Structure formats: C-alpha cells, structure tokens
Image: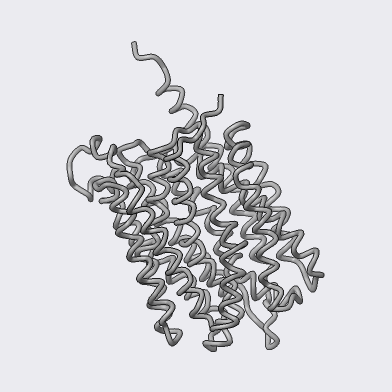
Amino acid sequence: MKQAFTKYQVFIVAMLAFLQFTIILDFMIISPLGAILMPALNISPAQFGLVVSAYAFSAGASGFIASGFADRFDRKRMLLFFYAGFILGTLFCALAPTYQVLLVARIVTGIFGGVLGSIVMAITTDLFPMSMRGRVMGFIQTAFAASQILGIPMSLFVSAKWGWHAPFLMIVGVSAAVGVAIIIVMKPIDEHLKLQKGHNPFRHMATTVTTPRYLLGFCLTALLTTGGFMLMPFTSAFTVNNLGIKLEDLPLLYLVPGVFAMVAGPLIGRWSDRVGHFRMFAIGSGFSVCLVMIYTHLGVTPMFWVIALTSVMMVAMTSRMIPSQALTSALPDPANRGSYMSVSSSIQQVSGGIASVAAGYIITADTSGKLIHFEQIGYVIAMTTFLSGILMYLINRAVTSRVVVESAPKL
C-alpha cells in the first residue's frame, strides 16, 4: 500500500523543491542569457563555455573538500550555511560590470551552490524510505521544469527590460524568502551523527571514495552530467541562429516544454516506484537518444515543431534523472550519505564543467552566429547514454542485493 506524506514531509518536499528551483535557475539562466551575454560582453563561444564551467569547477572542488565534513554536522545547519553563501555569490553576479568580474562571481557562487544539491539529496534520503523516494525525487525534480516555466521566461523578460544583471537580483530575492522559511520550520536533521565512528574527515572521505559500489554511482553521475552540460548552455544560441526562432520567442520555447516536464515529474516518480527504477531509466534513455539525435541535426524549423520536439525531449530526460537519483540514493550507508552525496555532486560539477568546455571547442560559430558541428554533441550524448545504461544495470543489481540482505531475518 502506498504510504501517504505527513504535513511535515509535504513541507520538506516543498522547501527542497523551492531551494532546488533557485539553485537550478541560477545555473540555467546563463544558458538562455547566452544569446544576450555573448554580444553584450563581446565574448566567444569558448569564453561563454568558461563562464558556465567556472561555476561547475569551483562547485566540484568545494563538494570534494566538504565530503570529509558532510556527515559531521546537523544537515539543517549545513544547508543554511551554504545557502547563505550561494545567495551572496548570486548577488555578486548581479553587480558584476564586466566579463572578468562575472567569471569570478560564478566561481564564488559555485563554491557554495555546488554543495547544496548534495545536502538536499542527503536530507531526502535521511527522511524518506526507498518506497517513497521516487515520488519525492519526482516532486523535487519539478524544480527543473519550474525554472523553465516561471524562472527562465521571467528572467528573460526582466533582462530585456532592465539588463542581464536583473535576473540574478530576482534569484537573490526568492532565495532569501526560502532561507527564512527553512530557518523557521525545518527541524534539526542529526540522526546520522549517532552513527559516526571517529572524527578524522580525511579518513571519512577516503572511505567514501574507495568503496567499490560507491564508485559505480560516481561513474554514472559523470556520464549523466556530460550530455546535459554539453547541450544546455548552447541551446538558446542554437535555437536563434540555427533553427531560425526569434529571440523574443525564446520565453515561449522554454515555457511549454517546462509545463510538460513539470506535470510529468511527479507521474514519472510514481511510476518509477511502481514499475522499477531501472526499467523507467531504460525507457527514458531510449527515447532521449532518439530525440537528441533529431534535435541536434535540425536546420531552420517552424516554431511549433521545435516546441513539440523539445517538450517530448524534456519529458524523456526527466524519465532518466528521477529513477537514477532514486536508485543511486540507496547506494551509501547512512553514516556516509552526506559524504557520498558531496563527492557525487563534486563529480557532477567537474564532469559538467569539462563537458561544457569541450562543447565550446567542438562547436564553432560562423560570421552570422550560426553554430557549426552542433550535431557532434548528439553523437557524444548517445555514447554516454549507452554507457550509463550499463552502469545503471550494475547499480540496480547492487542495490537489489543489499535490500535482500538487509531485509533477511537475523538468526
């Protein structure tokens, strides 16, 4: 029988979803602003890729360093500390006058923002059993869609009216409100502290990065990140310069697919819990490869078909992310969850940064702004998707065997 959420669990899910919304929007807003930022700051695709990856590399470094301490503190305190730093870093971005200052600001934001995703995952795993985790991940994943439905169109609107600095100020305002709500309502999350053995953070981190089954999860994270970080930062420039969509139509192009993904997220989470996380992941992967290959080979295309294809592609990608997060959350032991999530977040950011920089060198732009070699991104995504399917199969076996062993009667 399906377990119902308590009122407090509903609040936790809502707050984590709103928090994820601000983090994702802070990163994603760079992508649609690319068509505005590159001419405004007079930078090349390679330099723009560096702006994107600067956040990723600094987030990766801070996540790895934090892994030794991630299980040593109350998760609520950890969450508030890094969220405060994230808000200050985003404010720094809003005040940046030049490309160089913006680059530094993205590094500062990444140092704090990169750890937040791992804390959210650790809190989710601490508070919700495996039988509910698909649904929880489905709701939290709607933050990605909500950033497209509400955040990106609104950010594009305010950037057109008040300049590219304005969206970052908007994120600061929303984040501050979320932070206050967490301070007032969230209870301490410190049960994991009772499981700690010793206080050496370096040994704790070493245990995490050398556990064989954890390595499967880390490799999967790296592969899943590659595709998104290669594709997303250049979609606005590709849409405008290659597909022939007007710049003022971009908000609608982000809005409609976002609505589809937001509606699909909770449904996919529920189906994932019901039919199995690996099976849902396999279905989503198959559709994702087909749709990405079609998308990256498009030429000038009518607006309707671009919206339709992007909407289905968003749902397919969501069908991969939700079950993969739910399944990999079962890999770490309770005493190592924070550390595992921090290292995983670090790998996600670093691999994403490498992918973004690589994409910036694979893709070139002609004198009209049209992106060349964009279809090669599709081939890379297809390859990483196939490899991630193999790893997901191995992880599914590892998690299933652990559940069987742990549920066996003690004789």
Q: Is residue 332 left or right of residue 143?
A: left
Q: Is residue 275 above or below residue 261?
A: above
Q: Position of residue 253 (x, y in %)?
A: 70, 67
Q: Is residue 96 above or below residue 53?
A: below
Q: Position of residue 367 (x, y in %)?
A: 68, 88
Q: Is residue 334 left or right of residue 290?
A: left
Q: Is residue 207 left or right of residue 151?
A: left
Q: Is residue 331 above or below residue 350?
A: above
Q: Position of residue 247 (x, y in %)?
A: 69, 78
Q: Is residue 205 above or below residue 311?
A: above
Number of marks drawn = 0
Residue at the (42%, 21%) spot, across then down: 407
Picture quadrant where residue 298 is located: bottom right
Quadrant housing the N terminus:
top right
Q: How is the image coloured?
A: one colour
Q: Residue furthest top?
A: 411
Quadrant housing the C terminus:
top left
Of 373 and 310, nearer the camera is 310
Residue at the (45%, 56%) spot, across then down: 19
Of 10 and 391, nearer the camera is 10
Of 139 and 359, nearer the camera is 139
Q: Position of residue 167 (x, y in %)?
A: 51, 74
Of 8 and 156, nearer the camera is 8
